[in-house]
Image (cartoon, rainbow, N blue to C red):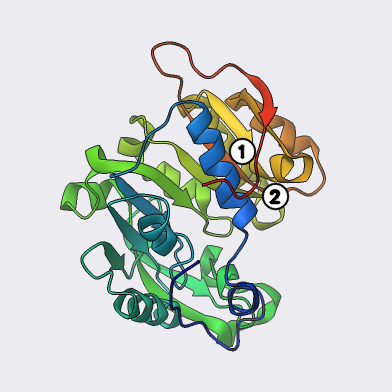
């Protein structure tokens, strides 16, 4: 988050502490994403960046100030995190480029229960049945939910202008994509968190089916960070993750262009590349 002036929660001991101490959060992840996209000829600069699960503006703010996006739409349902997001947009004079939306995205429009972890604002999550894990019922809040498709229909998301979707909602990814048929039918690349420990077996299978049916190519960003290599795999390789006991990574997903790009395989990666 170089060059940005951001407010973070002092109660957050993970993402906020990293940004306060080091000035950034997981720059290897962002660097690998844009390196991989550059290699396959993607040019989303001047387009719109959509972040679902924005927290205090973790990826949407650098998207418009560093990564070349013209504008961003940032979804964050938690009231406390949303207040920080609004403040950070204002502090950096980005009100005409970053549009914050205080709503969760899911597979239907309704009210949902958000569990607030307290010590890690990036780990807030929608919980099934409205019950928080570890019996911490006091740490929940009801929030409004919409769907990606409804947001497109309302004009909040102008899909033809979107260059990249960044989705990190702590195990609720399958539900968000299930409500995003317009996105899945488009050529917009997607970064999605994949955490086996945050998903039920049913949600995991649902996510895998959506990925296999909708995308051609997958980059396991966690593997790339560990090996200093970018590996392009068929999207069906997501099923191989199911055989592992515990997986926490992020995936870059996209479709082939008319020329059949990219070639599946590995290439060098420069971590932190713009």
Q: Secondary structure at mark 1?
A: helix
Q: Which mark is residue 197?
A: none
Q: Nearer the viewer, residue 206 or 254?
A: 254
Instruction: Determine the residue positioned at 55% across, 26% down.
Output: 217
Count neighbours of disc 1 (C-alpha within 10 A) and say few if under 14, some if 14 to 19, many if 20 or more.
some
Q: How many marks?
A: 2
Q: Residue at x 41, y 18 (%)?
A: 257
Q: Nearer the viewer, residue 71 or 174?
A: 71
- Depth check, mark 2 against mark 1: the one in front is 2
Which of the marked residues, 2 or 1, is nearer the chain's N terminus? Answer: 2
In the visual, does 11 lie left or right of 260?
right
Horizontal and vertical percent for residue 246? Answer: 79, 49
Residue 205: give its label: 1
Task: Give above or below for 250 relative to 95.
Answer: above
Q: Position of residue 62 (x, y in %)?
A: 43, 60
Instruction: Name the secondary structure under disc 2.
Output: helix
Q: Which residue is mark 2?
A: 196
Query: Residue placed at 40% from the left, 64% from the top?
Result: 61
């Amino acid at each position: 988050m170089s060059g940005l002036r951001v407010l973070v929660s002092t109660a957050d001991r993970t993402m906020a502490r990293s940004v306060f101490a080091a000035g950034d959060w997981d720059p290897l992840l962002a660097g690998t994403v844009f390196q991989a996209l550059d290699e396959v000829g993607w040019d989303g600069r001047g387009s719109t960046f959509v972040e679902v699960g924005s927290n205090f503006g973790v990826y949407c703010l650098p998207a418009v100030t560093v990564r070349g996006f013209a504008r961003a739409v940032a979804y964050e349902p938690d009231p406390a995190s949303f207040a920080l997001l609004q403040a950070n947009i204002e502090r950096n004079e980005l009100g005409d480029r970053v549009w914050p939306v205080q709503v969760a995205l899911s597979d239907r429009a309704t009210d949902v229960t958000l569990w607030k972890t307290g010590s890690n604002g990036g780990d807030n999550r929608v919980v099934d049945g409205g019950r928080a894990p570890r019996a911490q019922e006091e740490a929940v809040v009801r929030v409004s939910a919409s769907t990606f498709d409804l947001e497109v229909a309302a004009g909040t998301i102008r899909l033809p202008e979107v260059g990249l979707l960044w989705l990190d909602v702590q195990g609720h990814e399958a539900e968000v994509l299930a409500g995003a048929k317009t996105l899945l039918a488009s050529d917009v690349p997607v970064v999605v968190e994949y955490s086996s420990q945050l998903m039920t077996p049913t949600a995991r299978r649902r996510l895998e089916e959506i990925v296999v049916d909708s995308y051609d190519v997958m980059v396991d960003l966690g593997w790339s960070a560990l090996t200093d290599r970018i590996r392009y795999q068929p999207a069906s390789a997501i099923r191989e993750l199911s055989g592992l006991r515990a997986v926490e990574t992020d995936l870059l997903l996209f479709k082939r262009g008319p020329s059949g790009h990219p070639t599946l395989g590995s290439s060098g990666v420069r971590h932190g590349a713009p």
